[in-house]
Image (cartoon, rainbow, N blue to C red):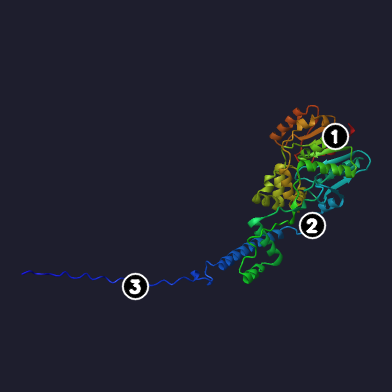
């Protein structure tokens, strides 16, 4: 008898029911989800406007720390600087033939028609540094003139220039930013609501040709031509030139081309490769605010680098002139554009300069390195009158006595 057994059927375990996922609203066309073009455009415009607003606030705050125009800047000057300005005059010179002329400030004293002396300051100084020298020379019957180089003192420190042309994406963003400045911050939101797009054309490339005020940054060749124009405009030729600090590098080219218009040369602590005022301290963002921001810090800065005997009122005058009207940026730019390859020995021994009487005034007690530089200059120029003085590298010695001696010789 066969016994048949049946195996029990395996029961399938019930599987949990899977809920059908509903399609997200962003996957449906026209629902305005987070990935829609309109939402992305709105977020972009919101962040862009927020960034522009923050940048604008920063610039407004920074601009409120300095005078807004030349009149308010002039009224904030110390009394002795305003008196110095009242004694001077401006001369128009042409830097570029296709642009407007710039103004150079000059002070003068003494009778016209006699021996003429032109004093050219170095970087960081101005005609204010030589005001006593000009007055003393004038009282002795010499027609003395001191100028402010472009970018310094009361001369023009900036000029109207065309901005570079922007194209592509940067050009479109610049156009948007310009439209915001012109039409207001909420203009873009209105455009977005009306059109649903960021207010710039995707396929059209616009070119920006705007003009702006930029600080003057002139190379040595242009500085030399400007000094020549001043000499011609004031009728100084033949002129006795007094060149301080970096001024020798700026004037050297013009002297070689116009040596017949030069009666004598006096170099006051002049070495084109070594400037008394450290430009890096005026260029680095944090250090420059600290140096130029307070009278006592700038006074200490000048006593450390330029002149130990300079008084607080003179240091404050230099600080104010350097700080206002793009003065710092112009001085830094001019310093970068100097011809540091200029060789004093080759220049003085050239055929054009060899026949011009030359004397060098040099600080012998400033530092050992500077004294060594002076000995090198004296060895390089053996036929030149070399006079040592006990002051610093910025003018506080009575150089008018030495200039008068040079004129008589």
Q: Position of residue 324 (x, y in %)?
A: 75, 53
Please tell me the numbered disc located at residue 259.
Answer: 1
Q: Position of residue 293 (x, y in %)?
A: 70, 53
Screen quadrant of the C terminus: top right
Tag 1–tag 2 contact (CB < 8 Å): no
Please tell me the numbered disc located at residue 70.
Answer: 2
Q: Position of residue 319 (x, y in %)?
A: 74, 50
Upstream in sequence: badge 3 or badge 2: 3
Residue at the front extreme of this rendering: 1
Q: Nearer the viewer, mark 1 or mark 2?
A: 1
Please tell me the numbered disc located at residue 129.
Answer: none
The answer to whether residue 190 is above or below residue 113 is below
Crowding at label 2, few (<14), some or many (≥20) Cα neighbours within 10 Å?
A: few
Screen quadrant of the N terminus: bottom left
In-image side of 77 versus 367 (left or right)? right
When asked about the image quadrant of residue 335, the answer is top right
Please tell me the numbered disc located at residue 17.
Answer: 3
Upstream in sequence: badge 1 or badge 3: 3
Alpha carbons under labels 1 and 3: distance apart: 103 Å
């Amino acid at each position: 008898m066969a016994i048949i057994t049946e195996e029990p059927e395996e029961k399938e375990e019930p599987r949990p029911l899977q809920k059908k996922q509903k399609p997200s609203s962003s996957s449906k066309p026209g629902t305005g989800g987070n990935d829609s073009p309109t939402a992305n455009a709105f977020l972009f415009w919101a962040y862009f406007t927020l960034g522009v607003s923050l940048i604008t606030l920063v610039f407004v705050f920074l601009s409120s720390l300095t005078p807004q125009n030349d009149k308010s800047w002039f009224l904030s000057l110390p009394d002795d600087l305003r008196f110095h300005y009242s004694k001077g005059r401006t001369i128009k010179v042409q830097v570029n033939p296709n642009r407007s002329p710039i103004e150079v400030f000059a002070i003068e004293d003494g009778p016209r028609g006699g021996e003429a002396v032109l004093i050219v300051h170095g970087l960081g100084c101005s005609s204010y540094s030589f005001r006593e020298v000009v007055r003393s020379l004038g009282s002795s019957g010499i027609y003395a003139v001191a100028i402010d180089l472009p970018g310094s003192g009361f001369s023009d420190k900036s000029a109207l220039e065309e901005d570079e042309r922007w194209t592509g994406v940067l050009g479109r963003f610049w156009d948007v930013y310009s439209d915001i400045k012109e039409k207001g911050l909420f203009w873009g939101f209105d455009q977005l609501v009306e059109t649903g797009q960021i207010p710039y054309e995707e396929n059209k490339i616009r070119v920006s040709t705007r003009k702006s005020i930029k600080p003057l940054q002139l190379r040595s060749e242009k500085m030399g031509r400007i000094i020549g124009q001043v000499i011609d405009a004031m009728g100084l030729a033949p002129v006795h030139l007094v060149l301080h600090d970096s001024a020798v590098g700026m004037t050297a080219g013009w002297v070689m081309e116009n040596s017949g218009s030069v009666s004598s040369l006096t170099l006051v602590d002049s070495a084109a490769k070594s400037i008394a005022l450290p430009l890096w301290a005026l260029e680095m963002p944090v250090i420059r605010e600290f140096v130029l921001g307070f009278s006592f810090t700038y006074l200490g800065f000048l006593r450390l680098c330029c002149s130990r005997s300079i008084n607080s009122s003179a240091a404050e005058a230099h600080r104010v002139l350097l700080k206002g009207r793009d003065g710092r940026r112009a001085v830094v730019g001019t310093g970068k554009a100097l011809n540091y390859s200029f060789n004093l020995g080759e220049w003085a021994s050239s055929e054009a300069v060899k026949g011009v009487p030359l004397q060098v005034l040099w600080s012998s007690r400033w530092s050992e390195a500077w004294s060594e530089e002076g000995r090198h200059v004296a060895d390089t120029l053996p036929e030149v009158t070399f006079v040592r003085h006990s002051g610093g590298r910025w003018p506080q010695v009575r150089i008018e006595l030495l200039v008068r001696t040079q004129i008589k010789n």
